Image: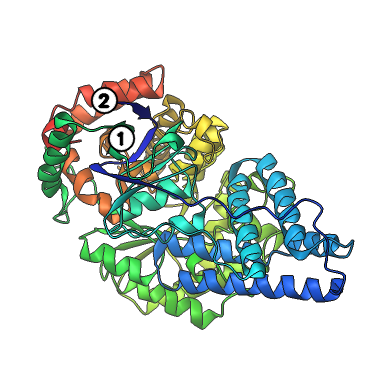
Amino acid sequence: MQNFVGVGVFRGRVIGPVRHMPAALAEPPAGEKLASSTAPETAAAALKEAAAAVKAQLLARAGRVEGTGREVLEATALMATDSMLIKAAVKLINTGTSAERAIWEAGESVAAMLQGLGGYMAERAHDVQDVKSRIVAQLRGVPAPEIPDADAPFILVAEDLAPADTATLDPSKVVALVTAGGGPQSHTAIIARALGLPAVVAAAGVGVLADDALVFVDGAAGVISTEPGDAERAAVAAWQEQASLLSVFDGEGRLADGTLVPLLANVGGAADARAAAAANAQGVGLLRTEFCFLGNDTEPSHADQVAAYKGVFDAFPGQKVVVRTLDAGADKPLPFLTDTSEANPALGVRGYRTDTSTPGVLARQLAAIADAAAQSDAAVWVMAPMISTAAEAADFAALCAEAGLRIPGVMVEVPSAALTARHLFDHVEFASLGTNDLTQYAMAADRQLGALAALNDPWQPAVLALIQATVTGAASQARHSAAQALEDTAPKPVGVCGESAADPVLAVVLAGLGVTSLSMTPRALPAVSAVLRTVTLPQARALALRAVDAPSAAEARELVRAGLPALAELGL
């Protein structure tokens, strides 16, 4: 037996045959020139036509999926006709390079530039590599490499997956996902969680596994084992039996002593919202409004936005729906809003900051949200991403007031926001911790790099301390307000809508730190609920203190797991 260890990103134990992602498209020969009978203008036109065809294909695939998968495909589609990529390729064509070689070299150059920027832009490099190959395949008239098909379910093994491939994984065929690269917050990991697919990333060496070899995958422990025996088969059987205990959420998130911790859903559109409501989510903790903008060359109309938001609100009458305003920039460039020439877009004009460079888009979005809310029975809260200062929080709250939205909030993704939370709460009514970005920024660790997976871990004590600081800021602000008003004031709500909320063990820590709600992929609701119901609030607080005081992420995780004996019974 041979073992490979990576980072587990979604629980589950399976045994199945290996299928490798097909080899990448063959590189056009270096120095390949235009045919003597082909004019550069003709080759450039053919290239643009192929790029447009690839964009159309990806958008068509996006129309067949929902949520995160749709967002990823739409963002990748935009990259296929990215002006920087196409202009670089046309410039090479004009020097006599073949169209296939030109787009290949241009793609390599753009991807290398993005990779060098790190952070979100490194993630866009995967898109460039993907669309570069797809355009070459289109020019050659051959199919691009796709996820393999098979009569029986299989375990997909790859160096990494292009976002467009990850977004269309079929869980009835792919029963587990293993990659040598990637990180715990990559698109591959996020979509695996959304699909409920056992997955391990950053598992070095798995490329040597032979096709059809039978392997055991433990998505919680992050282990892949060859030649599974009786122990592994027993572990799979036990998981299948225990999984039935974690298949249904009854619609009430609470601790063992009755303390309420509402469990909400992250959604990306009306279909997602209806599925979340069917899964008994207690509301929406994150509505990603990018679904209304991605794939468009121009800003959507007021009517289109109202209809899109109302579709989500109508799925949760009488319940809370937290809307995140447009999080454009960095990994989600929009032609009418963002500057793709920024040297470091991950630290540039993104999220709320786009209102400073392109004023008006945010105000128009808030007006559409307000109109949709007025036509619905949902309790609509609105928050801005990438808020860094109290002044920004105040400006956003003023914009919400002008639109008639009464409950403004902020995303805490930047360490400065966590450390000055008390001042932010002077202006807004709630905060939601985006732990994916908070971890990446706090640890200076690109979430796409498997080599940095240990740093890019929300269990890092530094990240937990920032969460604690945010909750403390909410409580301090409440006490400050109470002193002024001479009456008791409850702390303002602090939720978590990052991927960490979907970790049943970390959810206990978050509750213990004072987080008031958790929002996640609907598939995670039953497991998170089951574990929360095994601890009281004092027990959760004690475990949270252990985690914050731990010297490392690994020790924090182990200390908390050791304090949760019910995990074994639940198969977690």
Q: Quadrant of residue 142?
A: bottom right
**Alpha-carbon distance for marks 2 and 1?**
8 Å
99 to the left or right of 437: right
168 to the left or right of 151: right
In this picture, is 344 found above or below 8? below
Residue beneath the point at 44% across and 55% down: 166
Read off the residue under disc 1. 506
Tell me if residue 533 can be seen: no
* SS of the residue under disc 2: helix
In this picture, is 526 found above or below 271? above
52 to the left or right of 549: right
Residue beneath the point at 67% across and 67% down: 81
220 to the left or right of 337: left
In this picture, is 495 found above or below 566? below
Q: Are marks 2 and 1 in contact (CB under 8 Å)?
A: yes
Q: Quadrant of residue 314?
A: bottom left
Tell me if residue 500 can be seen: yes
Alpha-carbon neighbours of circle 2 within 10 Å: few (<14), some, or many (≥20)?
A: many
Q: Toward the viewer: 430 or 228? A: 228
Alpha-carbon neighbours of circle 1 within 10 Å: few (<14), some, or many (≥20)?
A: many
- Image coordinates of residue 3 in percent, x first then y, are 33, 27
Q: Say which label, 2 or 1, has the lower sequence index.
A: 1
- Image coordinates of residue 183 in percent, x first then y, are 47, 38
Looking at numbered disc 1 in the image, what kind of residue is underneath it? Leu
Read off the residue under disc 2. 560
Furthest toward the right, the residue is 95
Residue beneath the point at 18% across and 38% down: 531
- Image coordinates of residue 326 in percent, x first then y, are 54, 62
- Image coordinates of residue 514 in percent, x first then y, are 31, 36
Q: Toward the viewer: 348 or 333? A: 333
Looking at numbered disc 2 in the image, what kind of residue is underneath it? Val
Query: Count the marks: how many?
Result: 2
